[in-house]
Amino acid sequence: DSGVTQTPKHLITATGQRVTLRCSPRSGDLSVYWYQQSLDQGLQFLIQYYNGEERAKGNILERFSAQQFPDLHSELNLSSLELGDSALYFCASSGTPTIGTGGQWDYGYTFGSGTRLTVV
Amino acid sequence: AQTVTQSQPEMSVQEAETVTLSCTYDTSENNYYLFWYKQPPSRQMILVIRQEAYKQQNATENRFSVNFQKAAKSFSLKISDSQLGDTAMYFCAFMKNLGYSTLTFGKGTMLLVSP
């Protein structure tokens, strides 16, 4: 268990529908990232939140939106779904870098196990 | 913007042999971080190894080592004594700042280890 929890693990929905993917970051991590992995686009960064505020935006469609709540969990909302939105959606979280026992920086960037979205 | 290129979509190796996966990147940054992630059939993203650009010494983690050539912007992964469990998709990734930064991934290399 990586400490980052994503629900649901699988989701099947029809075109035109709206879904919400949920991510609970590792305890203490303030930053949450969303990535999309599709066959044609590979792994792409969508959006980042830090302590409730949007921090960075990548190749996120206007039909997609996200937010981070006061308890630091995050939700990714996908609307007007199209067949091409079928993908694996990863959430990752990170905290303040710390020095580990070997003297190496632990950047603490941890991925969840993903949500597999299938649009039919 | 940073780009990461993995030119080998698929590679095959036999158990116990050594294989090298290639990665090149493009950036105007001087300090940054490079990673290799493994994605087995379970789809979990697993960190294999990382390299800080300011370190000249190549990183090693047991059977995994990298050849980091900063001037050439090259970052290859060498897997020694390949095992069946190494069969997975391998992604090379770039990060600008440690901690609160996003990852830019290559397209991946599918590695198949056969008996």
Image: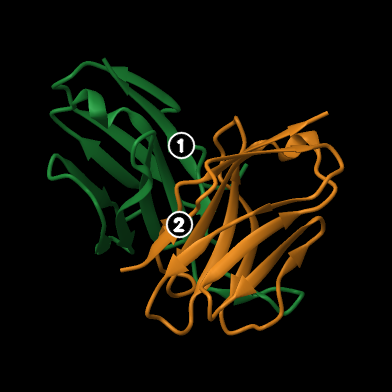
Chain colours: A green, B orange
Q: Residue at x 35, y 49 (%)?
A: A44
Percent across and percent down for residue A12 are 33, 18
Question: Residue at label 1?
Answer: A114
Q: Amino acid at mark 1?
A: Gly
Q: Is residue B54 left or right of residue B102?
A: right
Q: Is residue A40 left or right of residue B106?
A: left
The answer to whether tags 2 and 1 share a subunit is no
Percent across and percent down for residue B110 are 58, 38
Answer with the quarter of the image where residue A47 lies.
bottom left
Q: Residue at x 83, y 45 (%)?
A: B17
Give whichever of A85, A113 is nearer the camera: A85
Percent across and percent down for residue B44 are 56, 39
Chain label for disc 2: B
Question: Residue at label 2?
Answer: B5
Secondary structure category for the residue under label 2: strand
Marks 2 and 1, Cα distance to the nearest angstrom? 24 Å
Q: Residue at x 23, y 23 (%)?
A: A83
A40 shown above or below B57? above
Q: Amino acid at mark 2?
A: Thr
Secondary structure category for the residue under label 1: loop
User: Dot 1: within a 10 Å radius of its alpha carbon, few (fewer than 14), some, or many (20 or more) residues?
Assistant: many
Give whichever of A42, B43 is nearer the camera: A42
Q: Residue at x 53, y 56 (%)?
A: B92
Location of the C terminus of chain A by quadrant is top left
Q: Any mark on residue A30, and which? A: none
Cβ atoms at labels 2 and 1 below 8 Å apart? no
B66 shown above or below B98? above
Chain label for disc 1: A
Q: Is residue A28 visible?
A: no
User: Dot 2: within a 10 Å radius of its alpha carbon, few (fewer than 14), some, or many (20 or more) residues?
Assistant: some
Q: Is residue A88 left or right of residue A60?
A: right
Q: Is residue B28 left or right of residue A68?
A: right
